[in-house]
Amino acid sequence: MKTKQYSINLSVLTILALTIAFGIGNSSQVFADRGGVYTPHDINRDGFLDKEEFKIFIEKRRVKQEYAHLWVFDDVDMDKDGKISREEMSRSLNQEMRLRLEKKSRKPNP
């Protein structure tokens, strides 16, 4: 039996992860510029998510318990500047997507 292998471009994975996280496709608008994340969760419109905005993002997203360790503010905020940038958000989203894909690939085919 031949097994198909798929390669995923990380930028495509990032776009997919951002799409899932921010719910693109409904009324939400998300785009990034100059290292910032622009989303309905960015209440002060500074292009970053502070702790309170991040908390709202996590609550609305309803992160599954098995991925909660990826969404601790102080861990996502890699440069420790007190705000989440696009790169920091993308890193955590990519980690979650990798874990989800690994979990899915471990499931036996029926």
Image (cartoon, rainbow, N blue to C red):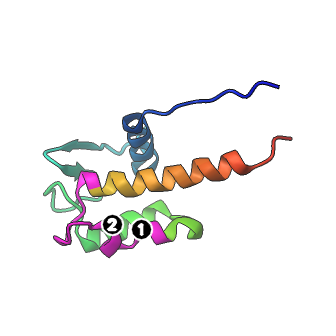
- Which is nearer the N-term, disc 1 or disc 2? 1
Image coords of residue 29 (percent x, y): 30, 43
Which quadrant holds the C terminus?
top right
Distance from Cα at disc 1 to Cα at disc 2: 6 Å
- Label 1, on which residue? 71
Which is more toward the observer, 46 or 65? 65
Which is more toward the observer, 58 or 67? 67
For image coordinates 22% across by 69% down, the residue present is 50
For image coordinates 31% across by 75% down, the residue present is 74
Image coords of residue 45 (percent x, y): 15, 56
Please say if the residues under marks 1 and 2 sit with CB atoms less than 8 Å apart.
yes
- Label 2, on which residue? 76
Image coords of residue 105 (percent x, y): 68, 45
Which is more toward the observer, 3 or 8? 3
Which quadrant holds the N terminus?
top right
User: Does residue 109 appear anywhere in the picture?
Assistant: yes
Q: Say if 69 sits above or below 23 in the image.
A: below
Judged left or right of residue 45, residue 103 is: right
Amino acid carrying label 1: it is Trp
Q: Which residues are magenta?
A: 69-87
Circle number at residue 59:
none
Q: Say if 85 sits above or below 70 in the image.
A: above
Amino acid carrying label 2: it is Val
Image coords of residue 6 (percent x, y): 58, 30
Q: How packed is label 2: few (under 14 Cα within 10 Å), some, or many (20 or more)?
A: many
Element at badge 2? helix
Q: Judge whether residue 74 is colored magenta.
A: yes
